[in-house]
Image: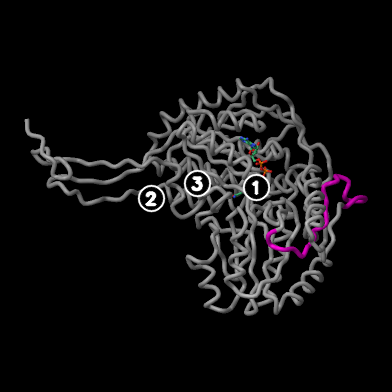
Amino acid sequence: MDFLQKLGIDSYNQGVSTGVHWVGSEGEIIPSFSPVDGKHIASVFLADANGYETAVAKAQEAFKEWRLWPAPKRGEVVREIGMKLREHKHALGQLVSYEMGKSLQEGWGEVQEMIDICDFAVGLSRQLYGLTMQSERAGHRMYEQWHPLGITGIISAFNFPVAVWSWNSMLAWVCGNVCIWKPSEKVPLCSIACQHITAEVFERLQVPEGVSNLVVGGRDIGELMARDHRIPLVSATGSSRMGKAVGIAVAERFGKSLLELGGNNAIIITPDADIDIAMTGAVFGAVGTAGQRCTTTRRLIVHSSIYEEVKSRLVRAYSQLRIGNPLNQENHVGPLIDTMAVDMYSKAIEACKDQGGNFIVEGGVLNGDGYESGCYVKPCIAEVKPDYPIVCTETFAPILYIMPYNDLEEAIEIQNSVPQGLSSSIMTKNLREAELFLSQSGSDCGIANVNIGTSGAEIGGAFGGEKETGGGRESGSDSWKAYMRRQTNTINYSAKLPLAQGIRFDL
Ligand code: NAD
């Protein structure tokens, strides 16, 4: 596994870094096992309270200097990170695939997404603009400007071990913030590799130590960050359960949070759909990354006139799926992240059966040759009613629920009836259906697509969702505003002091 060496991963790795320097820790050591073959990859010293304090202190100090760098100069640093990522794309993609279990193509795709967000952030570094308004007072000028916030705390999930960090940090950096990243403890090596990659650039460009901090830790470190008043913005990606805890803790101290949480995404397939497109979108959406994307297709809402046809085509497509080592590009479906996830998958299948679900493609845990890690499961499909409790829950595994509808309003109501609101799509060639789905009485999700599945989003758009998905927006469009504070400035260049609203105050 020469990619480990190329990325600077040792057998034992420190889990705290303030940029170029690594900080020794007395914390617990955690081993990282690959879900691909169950083998031990390497171990990491988790951050302890001292390590965390060192990172916060360094970040506070670095912010004082970093915020004074002109934004395009900060953009130059991000541009160089993008160049380094291009150099390391092959190795980093392999590590993502091996440590997390997604396919090699998706591992490389994740690194490509990092490169794309770097390019986006570089352009942005010359466009952090505010508006100019007309003042009601003569001889006055009024405008708004955006200033950096300070420390951006980034808490990330296991399923996008590198891209989510880059979405946050590249934007936060060009905005003038410093970052502290707490990655998922399930994929610590990916974060260590990223830290090595950025360190090369930071050292060469003499970026202040403390602009990029890593604290590998568990939930306890995430909780410290959420409560820490020195961190004005906490951007947290993960389950709705985690987001609720973080959101409450951050709000209690009047901090800002950016929450990217669970999804329960549906595709509506209408009688006017191109069925070939609908099938590809649905199957890739449901089984890609073994159902472990926040945007995974979990529900198919199919018009009753084509319901039987869609069902039989799905059964046929699922019978052709190859499940196995994701580094082998012949395979379509890799493992779940760990045996706990396998357990949750099995329990969800049981619950679905108890609630009345009828499996048209049976699930099950795979054993034997090539499946030694115990993390491989069969993607499955169940016919359900939309209001089964299990259907309204996000199970992070390849279980697809299918249900019929009769008219489009009903389909949209079903689609919107779950607590989550991340991604949605409609498959139709009918303009009226498409526009109704996109209208104010259509999908209630942050992402609504036509003739594209629910999974996979381009970085140019704002990414995120409503309701229990948390309401945050990251990545493209004007998401950068979440990383800055807005200041309204009024300048009086007249020789008088007129008050607003015509109020007089004569002395
Ligand atoms: P998780 O909620 O278990 O953990 C996510 C991160 O939060 C980890 O770093 C974890 O250590 C930390 N954490 C857990 N509890 C915490 C707490 N109380 N306080 C502070 N930090 C805490 O999620 P996961 O299993 O790693 O990832 C899967 C989930 O993430 C799914 O629900 C998926 O939909 C969601 N996700 C959402 C998006 C999005 O953009 N909307 C993207 C990726 C993943």
* Disc 3 target residue: 79
In the rendered structure, does residue 124 fall within the stretch colored magenta?
Answer: no
- The residue located at (87%, 49%) in the rendering is 371
Closer to the chain start, of discs 3 and 1, is 3
The residue tagged with tag 2: helix, strand or loop? loop
Give the amino acid type for the residue marked by disc 2 in the picture. Answer: Gln
Which is nearer the eye, 151 or 223?
223
- The residue located at (64%, 62%) in the rendering is 266
Give the amino acid type for the residue marked by disc 3 in the picture. Answer: Arg
- Label 2 beta carbon less than 8 Å to ligand 1: no
- Label 1 beta carbon less than 8 Å to ligand 1: yes
Give the amino acid type for the residue marked by disc 1 in the picture. Answer: Phe
- Residue 294 x %, y %: 64, 52
Q: Nearer the viewer, mark 2 or mark 1?
A: 1
- Cα gap from disc 2 to disc 1, whole angstroms: 28 Å
* Disc 1 target residue: 160
